[in-house]
Amino acid sequence: MSSTPSIYQQLLKSTPYIIPQGRILVVDDEEHIRTLLKDALEELGYECDTAENGLRGLEKVEENKGKYEAILLDIHMPELNGIETLKRLKLSYPDISVVVLSASRDVENVRDALKEGAYDYVFKPFDLNELKNTIKRACERTKLIRENRDYQKNLEIKVAEQTETLINLYADTLEALVLALDLREHETGFHSYRVTEYSLTLARKLGLPDKALSILAKGALLHDIGKIGIPDSILLKPGKLTDEEWKIMKMHPTMGYELLKKIDFLEEAAEIVLSHHEHYNGKGYPRGLKGEQIPLGARIFSVVDALDAMTSNRPYRQALSFEEAIERIAKSSGSQFDPSIVRVFLSIPKEEWMEIRNRIEKAEEPYLKKLLHNLSKP
Protein backbone atom coordinates (compact mmCIF):
# COMPACT_ATOMS: atom_id res chain seq x y z
CA MET A 1 0.00 0.00 0.00
CA SER A 2 1.13 3.49 -0.68
CA SER A 3 1.09 6.19 1.93
CA THR A 4 2.64 9.57 2.66
CA PRO A 5 5.54 9.24 5.13
CA SER A 6 5.55 12.99 5.82
CA ILE A 7 2.14 12.66 7.48
CA TYR A 8 3.52 10.13 9.96
CA GLN A 9 6.62 12.22 10.55
CA GLN A 10 4.40 15.07 11.70
CA LEU A 11 3.46 12.99 14.73
CA LEU A 12 7.01 13.38 15.98
CA LYS A 13 7.13 17.12 15.32
CA SER A 14 3.69 18.08 16.62
CA THR A 15 3.01 19.91 19.85
CA PRO A 16 3.09 17.42 22.76
CA TYR A 17 -0.35 16.01 23.53
CA ILE A 18 -0.82 14.26 26.86
CA ILE A 19 -2.23 10.79 26.34
CA PRO A 20 -2.45 8.16 29.09
CA GLN A 21 0.41 5.72 28.78
CA GLY A 22 -0.42 2.26 27.57
CA ARG A 23 0.80 -0.52 25.37
CA ILE A 24 -0.17 -0.61 21.71
CA LEU A 25 0.28 -3.17 18.97
CA VAL A 26 0.62 -1.96 15.38
CA VAL A 27 -0.30 -4.62 12.81
CA ASP A 28 0.54 -3.53 9.25
CA ASP A 29 2.22 -5.29 6.34
CA GLU A 30 4.22 -2.19 5.35
CA GLU A 31 7.46 -1.93 7.31
CA HIS A 32 7.91 1.83 6.98
CA ILE A 33 4.42 2.44 8.37
CA ARG A 34 5.09 0.13 11.30
CA THR A 35 8.36 1.95 12.02
CA LEU A 36 6.88 5.43 11.76
CA LEU A 37 3.88 4.61 13.93
CA LYS A 38 6.07 2.89 16.51
CA ASP A 39 8.41 5.90 16.73
CA ALA A 40 5.51 8.33 16.91
CA LEU A 41 3.61 6.41 19.58
CA GLU A 42 6.69 5.93 21.74
CA GLU A 43 7.37 9.66 21.49
CA LEU A 44 3.86 10.21 22.83
CA GLY A 45 4.57 8.00 25.85
CA TYR A 46 3.26 4.63 24.73
CA GLU A 47 4.98 1.29 24.66
CA CYS A 48 4.64 -0.06 21.15
CA ASP A 49 5.07 -3.46 19.52
CA THR A 50 4.67 -4.28 15.85
CA ALA A 51 3.59 -7.22 13.73
CA GLU A 52 3.93 -7.63 9.97
CA ASN A 53 0.68 -9.54 9.40
CA GLY A 54 -2.52 -10.70 11.08
CA LEU A 55 -1.21 -14.11 12.12
CA ARG A 56 1.85 -12.61 13.76
CA GLY A 57 -0.37 -10.01 15.40
CA LEU A 58 -2.51 -12.73 16.98
CA GLU A 59 0.64 -14.45 18.22
CA LYS A 60 1.84 -11.19 19.80
CA VAL A 61 -1.47 -10.72 21.60
CA GLU A 62 -1.33 -14.30 22.87
CA GLU A 63 2.24 -13.84 24.07
CA ASN A 64 1.34 -10.63 25.92
CA LYS A 65 -2.05 -11.50 27.37
CA GLY A 66 -3.84 -8.53 28.88
CA LYS A 67 -1.00 -6.09 28.18
CA TYR A 68 -2.32 -4.23 25.13
CA GLU A 69 -4.72 -1.35 25.59
CA ALA A 70 -5.19 -0.82 21.85
CA ILE A 71 -4.36 -2.40 18.50
CA LEU A 72 -3.90 -0.43 15.28
CA LEU A 73 -4.90 -2.93 12.64
CA ASP A 74 -4.45 -2.50 8.89
CA ILE A 75 -7.43 -3.88 7.02
CA HIS A 76 -5.74 -4.88 3.74
CA MET A 77 -3.02 -7.48 4.41
CA PRO A 78 -1.98 -10.75 2.76
CA GLU A 79 -2.53 -14.17 4.40
CA LEU A 80 -5.02 -12.97 7.01
CA ASN A 81 -6.76 -9.67 6.37
CA GLY A 82 -7.77 -7.18 9.03
CA ILE A 83 -11.42 -8.27 9.26
CA GLU A 84 -10.53 -11.93 9.86
CA THR A 85 -7.84 -10.92 12.34
CA LEU A 86 -10.37 -8.74 14.14
CA LYS A 87 -12.87 -11.61 14.38
CA ARG A 88 -10.29 -13.85 16.04
CA LEU A 89 -9.11 -11.12 18.37
CA LYS A 90 -12.60 -10.38 19.65
CA LEU A 91 -13.32 -14.03 20.38
CA SER A 92 -10.52 -14.24 22.94
CA TYR A 93 -9.81 -10.62 23.87
CA PRO A 94 -13.05 -8.62 23.63
CA ASP A 95 -11.80 -5.89 25.97
CA ILE A 96 -8.95 -4.68 23.70
CA SER A 97 -9.91 -1.62 21.66
CA VAL A 98 -9.10 -2.20 17.98
CA VAL A 99 -8.70 0.77 15.65
CA VAL A 100 -8.85 -0.31 12.01
CA LEU A 101 -6.57 1.47 9.51
CA SER A 102 -6.98 1.61 5.76
CA ALA A 103 -6.19 3.73 2.72
CA SER A 104 -9.48 2.54 1.21
CA ARG A 105 -12.62 4.56 1.94
CA ASP A 106 -14.92 1.70 1.06
CA VAL A 107 -18.04 2.00 3.27
CA GLU A 108 -18.47 -1.79 3.22
CA ASN A 109 -15.10 -2.20 4.92
CA VAL A 110 -16.08 0.29 7.62
CA ARG A 111 -19.39 -1.46 8.23
CA ASP A 112 -17.78 -4.91 8.39
CA ALA A 113 -15.10 -3.73 10.81
CA LEU A 114 -17.57 -2.08 13.19
CA LYS A 115 -19.86 -5.09 12.97
CA GLU A 116 -17.00 -7.35 14.07
CA GLY A 117 -16.25 -5.17 17.09
CA ALA A 118 -13.78 -2.51 15.96
CA TYR A 119 -13.73 0.46 18.30
CA ASP A 120 -13.06 2.97 15.52
CA TYR A 121 -11.91 3.32 11.92
CA VAL A 122 -9.22 5.74 10.72
CA PHE A 123 -8.44 6.42 7.06
CA LYS A 124 -4.96 6.86 5.61
CA PRO A 125 -3.44 9.38 5.27
CA PHE A 126 -4.25 10.22 8.87
CA ASP A 127 -5.44 13.48 10.26
CA LEU A 128 -2.93 14.15 13.02
CA ASN A 129 -5.32 15.21 15.76
CA GLU A 130 -7.87 12.56 14.80
CA LEU A 131 -5.30 9.80 15.16
CA LYS A 132 -4.01 11.04 18.51
CA ASN A 133 -7.50 11.52 19.93
CA THR A 134 -8.67 8.14 18.65
CA ILE A 135 -5.70 6.39 20.27
CA LYS A 136 -6.34 8.24 23.52
CA ARG A 137 -10.03 7.28 23.60
CA ALA A 138 -9.28 3.68 22.62
CA CYS A 139 -6.81 3.26 25.48
CA GLU A 140 -9.13 4.94 27.96
CA ARG A 141 -11.96 2.63 26.92
CA THR A 142 -9.86 -0.49 27.43
CA LYS A 143 -8.58 0.72 30.79
CA LEU A 144 -12.11 1.55 31.89
CA ILE A 145 -13.39 -1.90 30.91
CA ARG A 146 -10.53 -3.59 32.75
CA GLU A 147 -10.87 -1.41 35.83
CA ASN A 148 -14.59 -2.15 35.93
CA ARG A 149 -13.92 -5.88 35.51
CA ASP A 150 -11.33 -5.82 38.30
CA TYR A 151 -13.70 -3.83 40.49
CA GLN A 152 -16.48 -6.38 39.92
CA LYS A 153 -14.08 -9.23 40.63
CA ASN A 154 -12.87 -7.61 43.86
CA LEU A 155 -16.45 -6.84 44.82
CA GLU A 156 -17.43 -10.47 44.27
CA ILE A 157 -14.50 -11.58 46.43
CA LYS A 158 -15.49 -9.18 49.21
CA VAL A 159 -19.13 -10.25 49.02
CA ALA A 160 -18.06 -13.90 49.16
CA GLU A 161 -15.85 -13.18 52.17
CA GLN A 162 -18.63 -11.31 53.95
CA THR A 163 -21.11 -14.07 53.10
CA GLU A 164 -18.74 -16.68 54.52
CA THR A 165 -18.34 -14.60 57.68
CA LEU A 166 -22.12 -14.36 57.99
CA ILE A 167 -22.50 -18.10 57.42
CA ASN A 168 -19.97 -18.79 60.16
CA LEU A 169 -21.87 -16.48 62.53
CA TYR A 170 -25.11 -18.27 61.69
CA ALA A 171 -23.44 -21.65 62.24
CA ASP A 172 -22.14 -20.47 65.62
CA THR A 173 -25.67 -19.37 66.51
CA LEU A 174 -27.10 -22.77 65.58
CA GLU A 175 -24.38 -24.56 67.52
CA ALA A 176 -24.97 -22.38 70.58
CA LEU A 177 -28.72 -23.06 70.49
CA VAL A 178 -28.24 -26.82 70.12
CA LEU A 179 -25.64 -26.80 72.90
CA ALA A 180 -27.95 -24.79 75.18
CA LEU A 181 -30.64 -27.43 74.79
CA ASP A 182 -28.18 -30.30 75.04
CA LEU A 183 -27.03 -29.01 78.42
CA ARG A 184 -30.62 -29.30 79.62
CA GLU A 185 -31.45 -32.65 78.02
CA HIS A 186 -28.40 -34.78 77.24
CA GLU A 187 -29.97 -36.90 74.48
CA THR A 188 -31.19 -33.87 72.52
CA GLY A 189 -27.95 -33.20 70.61
CA PHE A 190 -27.75 -36.46 68.68
CA HIS A 191 -31.54 -36.60 68.42
CA SER A 192 -31.55 -33.15 66.79
CA TYR A 193 -28.83 -34.09 64.31
CA ARG A 194 -30.52 -37.41 63.47
CA VAL A 195 -33.94 -35.92 62.79
CA THR A 196 -32.30 -33.21 60.69
CA GLU A 197 -30.69 -35.82 58.43
CA TYR A 198 -33.88 -37.91 58.45
CA SER A 199 -35.94 -34.87 57.45
CA LEU A 200 -33.62 -34.02 54.57
CA THR A 201 -33.71 -37.62 53.32
CA LEU A 202 -37.51 -37.73 53.26
CA ALA A 203 -37.87 -34.20 51.88
CA ARG A 204 -35.52 -34.94 48.99
CA LYS A 205 -37.60 -38.00 48.12
CA LEU A 206 -40.62 -35.70 48.07
CA GLY A 207 -38.80 -33.36 45.67
CA LEU A 208 -38.58 -30.25 47.84
CA PRO A 209 -36.46 -27.40 46.40
CA ASP A 210 -33.20 -26.33 48.02
CA LYS A 211 -34.65 -23.35 49.90
CA ALA A 212 -37.39 -25.47 51.45
CA LEU A 213 -34.79 -28.08 52.40
CA SER A 214 -32.73 -25.44 54.18
CA ILE A 215 -35.74 -24.13 56.13
CA LEU A 216 -36.82 -27.65 57.06
CA ALA A 217 -33.34 -28.62 58.22
CA LYS A 218 -33.04 -25.61 60.51
CA GLY A 219 -36.51 -26.25 61.90
CA ALA A 220 -35.68 -29.92 62.49
CA LEU A 221 -32.40 -29.12 64.19
CA LEU A 222 -34.05 -26.65 66.57
CA HIS A 223 -37.49 -28.24 66.91
CA ASP A 224 -37.16 -28.69 70.68
CA ILE A 225 -35.38 -25.41 71.43
CA GLY A 226 -38.42 -24.26 73.41
CA LYS A 227 -37.61 -26.90 76.03
CA ILE A 228 -34.95 -24.60 77.44
CA GLY A 229 -37.91 -22.76 79.00
CA ILE A 230 -39.34 -25.88 80.63
CA PRO A 231 -38.41 -26.43 84.32
CA ASP A 232 -35.96 -29.29 84.99
CA SER A 233 -38.46 -30.89 87.35
CA ILE A 234 -40.70 -31.48 84.34
CA LEU A 235 -38.20 -31.78 81.49
CA LEU A 236 -36.01 -34.35 83.24
CA LYS A 237 -38.70 -36.18 85.17
CA PRO A 238 -38.18 -39.96 84.64
CA GLY A 239 -41.77 -40.91 85.29
CA LYS A 240 -45.14 -39.99 83.85
CA LEU A 241 -46.06 -36.31 83.85
CA THR A 242 -49.14 -35.09 85.70
CA ASP A 243 -51.87 -33.32 83.73
CA GLU A 244 -50.59 -29.95 84.96
CA GLU A 245 -47.00 -30.82 84.09
CA TRP A 246 -48.09 -32.00 80.66
CA LYS A 247 -49.80 -28.66 80.01
CA ILE A 248 -46.50 -26.93 80.75
CA MET A 249 -44.52 -29.37 78.57
CA LYS A 250 -46.86 -28.71 75.66
CA MET A 251 -45.85 -25.05 75.76
CA HIS A 252 -42.40 -25.79 74.33
CA PRO A 253 -43.35 -25.42 70.62
CA THR A 254 -44.74 -21.94 71.30
CA MET A 255 -41.71 -21.02 73.42
CA GLY A 256 -39.38 -22.16 70.63
CA TYR A 257 -41.35 -20.22 68.04
CA GLU A 258 -41.23 -17.02 70.10
CA LEU A 259 -37.47 -17.37 70.40
CA LEU A 260 -36.64 -18.16 66.77
CA LYS A 261 -39.03 -15.74 65.06
CA LYS A 262 -36.87 -12.89 66.37
CA ILE A 263 -33.79 -14.23 64.54
CA ASP A 264 -33.93 -13.23 60.87
CA PHE A 265 -32.34 -16.31 59.32
CA LEU A 266 -34.47 -18.64 61.50
CA GLU A 267 -37.81 -16.85 61.13
CA GLU A 268 -39.20 -19.26 58.51
CA ALA A 269 -37.90 -22.29 60.39
CA ALA A 270 -39.79 -21.06 63.46
CA GLU A 271 -43.07 -22.13 61.80
CA ILE A 272 -41.86 -25.74 61.74
CA VAL A 273 -40.86 -25.51 65.40
CA LEU A 274 -44.32 -24.18 66.29
CA SER A 275 -46.16 -26.91 64.36
CA HIS A 276 -44.04 -30.03 64.84
CA HIS A 277 -46.52 -31.62 67.31
CA GLU A 278 -49.62 -30.98 65.20
CA HIS A 279 -51.48 -34.08 63.98
CA TYR A 280 -52.98 -34.57 60.55
CA ASN A 281 -56.41 -35.26 62.11
CA GLY A 282 -56.35 -32.00 64.09
CA LYS A 283 -55.74 -33.60 67.50
CA GLY A 284 -52.22 -32.28 67.98
CA TYR A 285 -50.97 -29.16 69.72
CA PRO A 286 -50.52 -26.22 70.28
CA ARG A 287 -53.08 -24.93 67.72
CA GLY A 288 -54.97 -28.05 66.73
CA LEU A 289 -54.21 -27.57 63.04
CA LYS A 290 -55.56 -30.14 60.60
CA GLY A 291 -54.42 -31.53 57.24
CA GLU A 292 -52.74 -29.01 54.98
CA GLN A 293 -53.22 -26.27 57.56
CA ILE A 294 -50.05 -27.75 59.03
CA PRO A 295 -46.91 -26.45 57.25
CA LEU A 296 -45.46 -29.05 54.89
CA GLY A 297 -42.11 -28.99 56.68
CA ALA A 298 -43.80 -29.81 59.99
CA ARG A 299 -45.78 -32.66 58.39
CA ILE A 300 -42.55 -34.13 57.04
CA PHE A 301 -40.73 -33.64 60.32
CA SER A 302 -43.42 -35.26 62.48
CA VAL A 303 -42.96 -38.57 60.63
CA VAL A 304 -39.20 -38.79 61.11
CA ASP A 305 -39.41 -37.40 64.65
CA ALA A 306 -41.69 -40.29 65.54
CA LEU A 307 -39.27 -42.71 63.85
CA ASP A 308 -36.35 -41.45 65.93
CA ALA A 309 -38.35 -41.36 69.17
CA MET A 310 -39.52 -44.95 68.77
CA THR A 311 -36.06 -46.28 67.84
CA SER A 312 -34.33 -44.57 70.79
CA ASN A 313 -34.12 -45.84 74.36
CA ARG A 314 -36.08 -43.95 76.99
CA PRO A 315 -35.95 -44.29 80.80
CA TYR A 316 -39.46 -45.73 80.72
CA ARG A 317 -39.10 -48.09 77.71
CA GLN A 318 -36.70 -49.88 75.38
CA ALA A 319 -36.20 -48.77 71.78
CA LEU A 320 -38.25 -50.44 69.09
CA SER A 321 -36.62 -51.92 66.01
CA PHE A 322 -36.79 -49.86 62.84
CA GLU A 323 -39.13 -52.43 61.35
CA GLU A 324 -41.58 -52.09 64.27
CA ALA A 325 -41.36 -48.29 64.25
CA ILE A 326 -42.06 -48.13 60.51
CA GLU A 327 -45.11 -50.40 60.96
CA ARG A 328 -46.51 -48.12 63.68
CA ILE A 329 -46.03 -45.04 61.51
CA ALA A 330 -47.86 -46.79 58.67
CA LYS A 331 -50.78 -47.53 61.03
CA SER A 332 -50.96 -43.85 62.03
CA SER A 333 -51.21 -42.67 58.42
CA GLY A 334 -54.22 -40.40 58.06
CA SER A 335 -54.55 -39.81 61.79
CA GLN A 336 -51.25 -38.53 63.16
CA PHE A 337 -49.42 -38.31 59.83
CA ASP A 338 -50.07 -37.03 56.30
CA PRO A 339 -50.84 -40.13 54.14
CA SER A 340 -49.06 -38.75 51.07
CA ILE A 341 -45.88 -38.25 53.09
CA VAL A 342 -46.15 -41.66 54.75
CA ARG A 343 -46.39 -43.31 51.31
CA VAL A 344 -43.05 -41.80 50.30
CA PHE A 345 -41.59 -42.58 53.73
CA LEU A 346 -42.51 -46.26 53.34
CA SER A 347 -40.67 -46.39 50.00
CA ILE A 348 -37.37 -45.76 51.78
CA PRO A 349 -35.70 -48.98 53.00
CA LYS A 350 -35.18 -49.31 56.75
CA GLU A 351 -31.47 -49.84 56.08
CA GLU A 352 -31.20 -46.26 54.87
CA TRP A 353 -32.60 -44.93 58.16
CA MET A 354 -30.31 -47.23 60.11
CA GLU A 355 -27.28 -46.05 58.15
CA ILE A 356 -28.10 -42.41 58.92
CA ARG A 357 -28.47 -43.18 62.63
CA ASN A 358 -25.15 -45.01 62.75
CA ARG A 359 -23.40 -42.24 60.83
CA ILE A 360 -24.63 -39.54 63.21
CA GLU A 361 -23.78 -41.51 66.34
CA LYS A 362 -20.23 -42.06 65.06
CA ALA A 363 -19.86 -38.52 63.77
CA GLU A 364 -17.02 -36.42 65.05
CA GLU A 365 -17.05 -32.66 65.56
CA PRO A 366 -15.84 -31.73 62.01
CA TYR A 367 -18.83 -33.56 60.48
CA LEU A 368 -21.29 -31.78 62.77
CA LYS A 369 -19.57 -28.44 62.14
CA LYS A 370 -19.92 -29.00 58.39
CA LEU A 371 -23.61 -29.80 58.81
CA LEU A 372 -24.16 -26.60 60.78
CA HIS A 373 -22.18 -24.63 58.20
CA ASN A 374 -24.31 -26.00 55.35
CA LEU A 375 -27.53 -25.23 57.22
CA SER A 376 -26.39 -21.64 57.72
CA LYS A 377 -26.05 -20.80 54.02
CA PRO A 378 -28.56 -18.22 52.75
Image: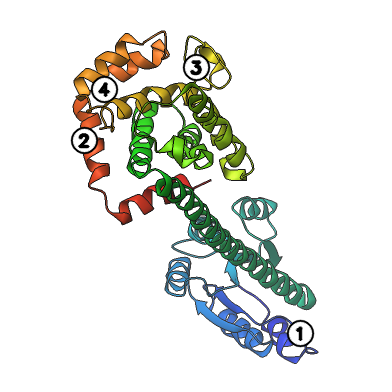
Q: Residue at x 56, y 41 (%)?
A: 266
Q: Amino acid at mark 4?
A: Ile
Mark earlier in primary sequence (2, 3): 3
Q: Are marks 1 and 3 in contact (CB under 8 Å)?
A: no
Q: Label 2 vs label 3: CA separation?
A: 30 Å
Q: Are marks 2 and 3 in contact (CB under 8 Å)?
A: no
Residue depicted at 62% across the width and 74% down the height: 2
Identify residue type, mark 3: Gly
Which disc, if any, is residue 200?
none
Look at mark 2 in the image and give the residue it sits on: 355
From what the image shows, is residue 76 above or below residue 339?
Answer: below
Compute the Cα span from label 2 to label 1.
Answer: 73 Å
Q: How is the image coloured?
A: rainbow
Q: Earlier in the sequence, mark 3 or mark 4?
A: 3
Q: Tell me: 143 left or right of 247.
A: right
The x, y position of residue 272, in whole percent, is 52, 30
Q: Which residue is mark 1?
A: 18
In the image, is residue 10 above or below residue 96?
below
Q: Which residue is mark 4?
A: 348
Residue 234, picture quadrant: top left
Point out the frontmost of discs 3 and 4. Answer: 3
- Going from N to C along the chain, the mark reached first, 1 or 3, is 1
Earlier residue among tags 2 and 1: 1
